[in-house]
Image: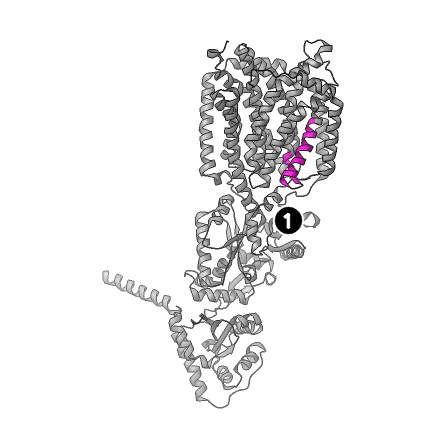
Amino acid sequence: MMYYNTPKVEKYLEYIQKNRVYIIVLFIVIISILLAFHRPTLLANDDSFWINESTELQRTLSKDYETSYIKKLEIDITGFDNEMKKKLQTLHNDLINTEKVHYIDSLFSANYIYHDNKYEDSSLVKSISVDEFTAVTLKKFVNKFYYPYTKYVDKEFTTLTMYLYTDESFTMKSLDIPFIYRFDEKEKKYNLQTYIMLIIFTVIFTVLFFYIIFKNYISGILALVITGSTLIISYSLMQVISKTSELHVATALIIVSIALIDYLYFYYRWHVSHYNMDVMKSDAQAMIKTLSRNLMPAMWTTIITIVGFGSLVIVDSLVVKMLAISAIGASLITYILNITLLPALLSYFYIEKHKVIFSKIAYNFANGEIHYNKWYLKIFLTITTVLLLGGSYNLFFATQKLFSESIDNKVISIKVAYPEVDYKLFKSLESFEYEIKENFEGISSLDSVVSILKLINIKEKNSEIDEESFLEALFFLELYDLEKNYITDESINIRINVGNADRSELINWITEYKKLDLYFTDMETIVKRSKTSSLSILSFSLAGALIIIGLIMGRIFREYKMILVAFMVNAIPIVWFMFFIQLFSIPLTLEMLIAMTITVSLGSDATVHFAYKYSRSRYQGRTKKRSLEIMFFYGAIPVAIGSLLLLFLFLLLTQIDIPTLNQIGWYGIIMMILSVITDLFILPVLLVEEDTFKSNKKN
Amino acid sequence: MKKFFYIIMILFVTFASAKDTSHKKVSLDISIPLLKSIESSAIRLGEGKTEVYVFLDPYCPHSQNFFEMINESKKMQKKYSYHIFLYELKRMKSHEIIRDIYANNNLLLQLQKLMVNKVNIPKTVKLNESIENKIETIEVIAKQLNVYKRPYLIMNKKRKSKK
């Protein structure tokens, strides 16, 4: 069926009307069963998903290497005297005795290697325990040989840093720390209270928002019914397909956003179709209009979402799969609900106040945009195309750049599998460290058996360590029992303090280094590695989805220009968003890609609905201006209302103390603004610009 | 003037290179055969894979510290085989005590008594020529090896013998 054909829906609606009670009861039963049997656990932190699918972790575990979370504890200190030293040492000891702490790298676990140069003829390398120092001598020692201790303390001894190697669940909250401190810990626990508050607030806000716009409560309540039902069914679908009950909370945002906007296309049409109608006739007529005008575009938006995101469902990544299923599921289920449950529910109501506050603005938009400046459009599209090409180049040839981050100050912990600690191994490690420092100048410190052996060998600091010096240094390392932090039975430990080097690039470089058998042992790096590879797939798939959306649009309207229009409209918000994050050197994250997934889903919906309404009007012989007015009135207003509501909901997320939701909130706001600007200002103008009705259809 | 400049340059290079080579370690290819030649005079401790040839002065506090550590550590005795040579540090004036140690039967026990337990060991009354020769041989080899510090370590990892 072509876009200009109107489907006959009268008989179908009669059937719905007749069986409305059964339909409603059927859905209530389905939802109740699903609620009873499929209760998902919502996770705000995505680490566990990445961990589950991490091949890097499997490699590490295959060697029986212990993995840890490295958490940085920064303590502000005033006046480093003996009492302060004692307090800090007590804290260090208390922390190390905590069950979930494996190891602490700090000033109080550091090695103090010392050569007694009092007599030239004495050569004994000495290791001094931190207990042997007074506060004054420790400060002097550290300042004299500063480099090995830079990561622990500043020269003035005002901030002390401890690196805690812990279990995932370790939290500082239970410990009493008698200092001002900063501790990098993520909120990992399922915070039921926050979610309940969020749901209550969303429900109240949605009902009030719809009341202000439509002057009735039922619009808001039905929005909640459709959105809630979509959410429950989609979650059950996700649990069945992905075979896990743990779902990322962000998928709820994708589902709610899609369901809400799709619902609005239907409800809005039903609402405004009461205009100028006899009260008795209006309900049936409004329902016919609603279904006949939305049935096809809504079906195409569902097909676009299924085809566009379909390839992601088979990707071997649970997170990517979840995002794809949530977008597809939401689109498909909302469509089914909007053509079955919604008409059945709406048949019980009628509209007294059918006016909508945005209608005048829609006409003003249409009048303004019909006289658009071609030059501005060309300049804008040229810049966008240049940015798009640059972004595509980065995506295909410099993917790593998209994830690059600077001034990270994290620690990467590695294990090197070895057959024997010998000079050959030492030289290989030395060469690895040399290459890493050559390639990443920002690295602040690199702690390994090489660095400690060099420290021991400092008496011959200008000479290269030969085999004998190596054996001698190793001997002293073992004599003072210092080797346990660097050498275990089957592996060598290396700790890299990333400093302001690009961690993402560094991880990639280490992964590709084949001269040593290297294994990551810190979970943050393992998660990041897994994330980066999956996010690359997701980025590629999103780019692919844009092309697919364009192609389907071309097929629907039998117009090749529509391919370009649809592609550009969906690409514009993403291209500009990517441009800004690259400009400010912000790495691409899952939260951004979730926001982009929402935008692409909603953007493609808007493109289909807008183009349908505009093209139908043009086909029916209306002028460009009138067609634009119709498009704005029936298409743009529900998009604007939905986007406004989503903006408020995203704003609400920014106020929540859960980092992932907080970030999605901010990125969602930015993407939503860019998307609305594109839908209201660019898409209509492009439809007029590429209008072919003038030549081959009656105008 | 030119000649004076050349003389200064030659002197500078000579002194600089002399300082550089005086404490330079002798390569293992040369030192191991020399050390093997006096191995019978060594006090043995440990049974590890890596051989450690150590020159100690019984009165030197660093040597005492070092000996105490290897004597106490079972781990260090399991990993390393020590060949200990007693070699006087002139400022310590330890020639007599070295002679007394070598005059006894159980050298290791005497060394432990003196350096760890800090107890006196029996004095030698008569001058024993063979002991003096032993001390002298060690001194000659030590000088050839540029041993200038105590403790002075030379490490040698035992190579796996080819079948």
Whether B141 is drawn above or below A9: the answer is: below
Q: Nearer the viewer, residue A680 or B13?
A: A680
Whether A414 is drawn above or below A226: the answer is: below
Residue A191 visible (yes or no): yes
Residue A206: in magenta span = no
User: Tag 1, which chain?
Assistant: A
Secondary structure under badge 1?
loop
Quadrant of the image for the N terminus of chain A? Answer: top right
Q: Which of B130 and A133 is in front in this view?
A: B130
Give x and y (percent) for residue A292: 63, 17
Place residue A327 in its image quadrant: top right
Q: Nearer the viewer, residue A142 or A661?
A: A661
Residue drawn 70% across and 23% down? A342
Place residue A252 in its image quadrant: top right
Q: Residue furthest left?
A: B2
Q: In this view, does A98 lie to the left or right of A457?
A: right
Amino acid type at image mark 1: Glu
Question: What span is colored magenta in the figure?
Answer: A226-251
Magenta stretch prevailing secondary structure: helix
Colour logic: one colour
Give x and y (percent) for residue B45: 52, 76
Residue A235: in magenta span = yes
Residue identified by numbered label 1: A168
Residue drawn 55% across and 22% down? A607
